[in-house]
Image: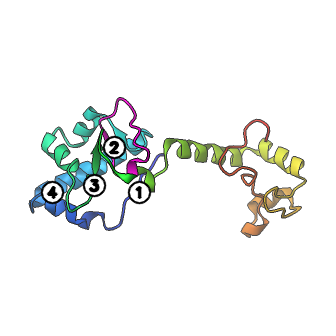
Amino acid sequence: MPYWLEDDAFPNWPVWDVLSAGNVDMADRLQSAYVRCKSTTAGVLADGYLTEQAALTQCRGRPKVLALLATAVLDRPPLLHRRGDECECLGDGVWIDGYAYRVHAFSKRNPSRKEYNRNRAQKADLRDSRLKALVYGRDGGCCRFCHSGPLNPKSGRAKDARKRLQYDHVDPDAPAGPEG
């Protein structure tokens, strides 16, 4: 399941007081809307991007809340970027068409769609007993990365991590694929 991470100090960020002009109810609305925006983009693997309609929906149809989230305060960038904003978190500045907003620094703490899918594929590879047997046979029970081994083929269940075979050492950034 996709996820998103948040800073522990999130509820106490000073931007909430400034954006809400000290109105506690507005600060709560802003925090809730921001959390819903992050959760929505994480859930659909959109790499921090939101359409105009999705952002407005997460702000419970309140354009003022959405406008405040897209406002820079305290010499900090806005929590939601609009197309055309300049911020180091936006990288090369290439904006994906069809989206109106992007959560500030979303990719700094959260996996991109590519990373999430790669991690899922790697976990699936580690559950594939046929693949494990092929890799074990191909490598003679030794790790191709750290050259440890030979290890017992049943060592995948070993309590000592040093005695477990590591199937993703060959290329940690890609699932094993059909060649094993």
What is the number of the mark on residue 5? 1
Question: CB of mark 2 within 8 Å of CB of mark 4?
Answer: no
Q: Nearer the viewer, mark 1 or mark 2?
A: 2
Earlier sequence position, callout 3 versus callout 4: 4
Examine the structure image and report whether residue 92 is included in the region drawn in magenta. yes
Q: Answer with the quarter of the image where residue 157 lies.
A: bottom right
Q: Residues within 10 Å of mark 4 (few under 14, many from 20)?
A: some
Name the residue beneath numbered marker 2.
102
Mark 2: amino acid = Arg
Question: CB of mark 3 within 8 Å of CB of mark 4?
Answer: no
Earlier sequence position, callout 1 versus callout 2: 1
Question: CB of mark 3 within 8 Å of CB of mark 1?
Answer: no
Q: Is residue 159 visible?
A: no
- SS for dot 1: loop
Earlier sequence position, callout 1 versus callout 4: 1
Q: Position of residue 46 (x, y in %)?
A: 42, 39
Mark 1: amino acid = Leu
160 vs 84, nearest the viewer: 84
Name the residue beneath numbered marker 4.
19
Location of residue 154 with respect to 118 vertically, above or below = below
Earlier sequence position, callout 2 versus callout 3: 3
52 vs 151, nearest the viewer: 52
- SS for dot 4: helix
Q: Position of residue 50 (x, y in %)?
A: 33, 38
Between marks 3 and 1, how big is the CA–CA gap? 19 Å
What is the number of the mark on residue 75? none
- SS for dot 3: loop
Q: Which residues are magenta?
A: 89-103
Name the residue beneath numbered marker 3.
77
Residue drawn at (67%, 45%) of the image: 174
Between marks 3 and 4, how big is the CA–CA gap? 12 Å
